[in-house]
């Protein structure tokens, strides 16, 4: 009997110390998630830092994104590389990327006027998927609360970001399993005010996620370079 009591006590302690299991969103959590992208849009511009794992090395981005104009501007570097193709400045829209190669450049205002190279934003490459993801974290209207509650979105756990309490929420999964090779599976760090503090997204079969951290911007992102204005 004593052994059984001791075993029960051990099991109780283990259960109390176990991590919480993911669960469907409450109404309040779904409402906050539904407003997260709209909040970014209302702020207009957010500063961000991001790391993007790729086959050519881990890319670091530091810049800002204008969710109203759907325009990003950032400094880029690649771990362990210092050539002109691995570092420089980026501007991008939902359809195109402008790259100004060369390490040691700062994302100044206004952007430099020369040496930009342009190409379409592509489906598939890790960097392009991350750039598209960043622009997609703003929306001009809230998402549908009821659809989020009915979806595969899950509350995962509580956490802190820069000492700010947050809820960690897994976004809805693709409706078709084969879509996971093309789309990012997104996890959100959402504070009590409904602001996105951090986002992680697993892209393709990469074991490490894209990580994006946000801080409010003091000034809007610059206007597009000439090629984007045509």
Image (tube, grey):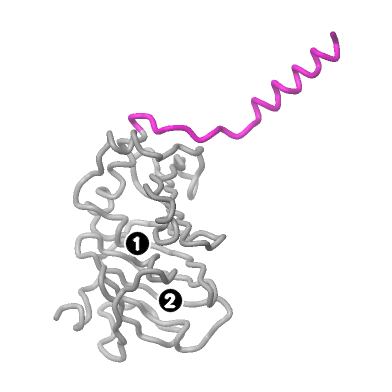
Q: Position of residue 217 (x, y in %)?
A: 31, 61
Residue at (45, 37) in percent of width and height: 155
Front: mark 1 or 2: 1
The residues colored magenta run 1-28
Disc number at residue 134?
A: 1
Q: Are marks 1 and 2 in contact (CB under 8 Å)?
A: no
Disc number at residue 76?
A: 2
Q: Position of residue 106 (x, y in %)?
A: 39, 79
Q: Position of residue 6 (x, y in %)?
A: 81, 17
Horizontal side of residue 69 vs 196, given as left or right? left
Residue 194: quadrant of the picture = top left
Quadrant that contains the N terminus: top right
Residue 229: quadrant of the picture = bottom left
Residue at (43, 55) in percent of width and height: 178
- Is residue 2 located in the magenta-colored stretch of the structure? yes
Please, which residue is most extreme toward the bottom here? 115
Residue 108 in view (yes/no): yes
N-terminal of the pair, mark 1 or mark 2, is: 2
From the viewer's perspective, is residue 203 above or below residue 153?
Answer: below
């Amino acid at each position: 009997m004593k052994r059984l009591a001791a075993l029960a006590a051990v099991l109780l302690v283990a259960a109390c110390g176990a991590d919480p299991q993911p669960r469907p969103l409450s109404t309040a959590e779904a409402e906050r998630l539904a407003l997260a992208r709209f909040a970014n849009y209302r702020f207009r511009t957010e500063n961000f830092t991001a790391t993007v794992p790729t086959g050519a090395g881990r890319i670091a981005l530091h810049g800002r994104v204008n969710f109203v104009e759907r325009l990003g501007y950032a400094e880029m570097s690649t771990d362990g590389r210092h050539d002109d193709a691995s570092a420089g400045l980026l501007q991008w829209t939902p359809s195109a990327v402008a790259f100004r190669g060369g390490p040691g450049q700062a994302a100044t205002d206004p952007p430099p006027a020369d040496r930009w190279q342009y190409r379409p934003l592509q489906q598939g490459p890790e960097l392009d998927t991350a750039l598209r993801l960043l622009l997609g974290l703003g929306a001009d209207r809230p998402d549908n609360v009821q659809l989020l509650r009915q979806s595969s979105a899950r509350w995962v756990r509580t956490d802190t970001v820069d000492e700010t309490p947050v809820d960690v929420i897994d976004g809805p999964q693709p409706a078709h399993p084969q879509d996971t090779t093309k789309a990012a599976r997104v996890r959100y760090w959402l504070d009590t005010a409904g602001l996105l503090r951090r986002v992680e997204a697993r892209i393709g079969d990469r074991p490490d996620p894209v990580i994006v951290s946000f801080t409010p911007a003091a000034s809007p992102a610059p206007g597009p370079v000439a090629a984007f204005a045509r």
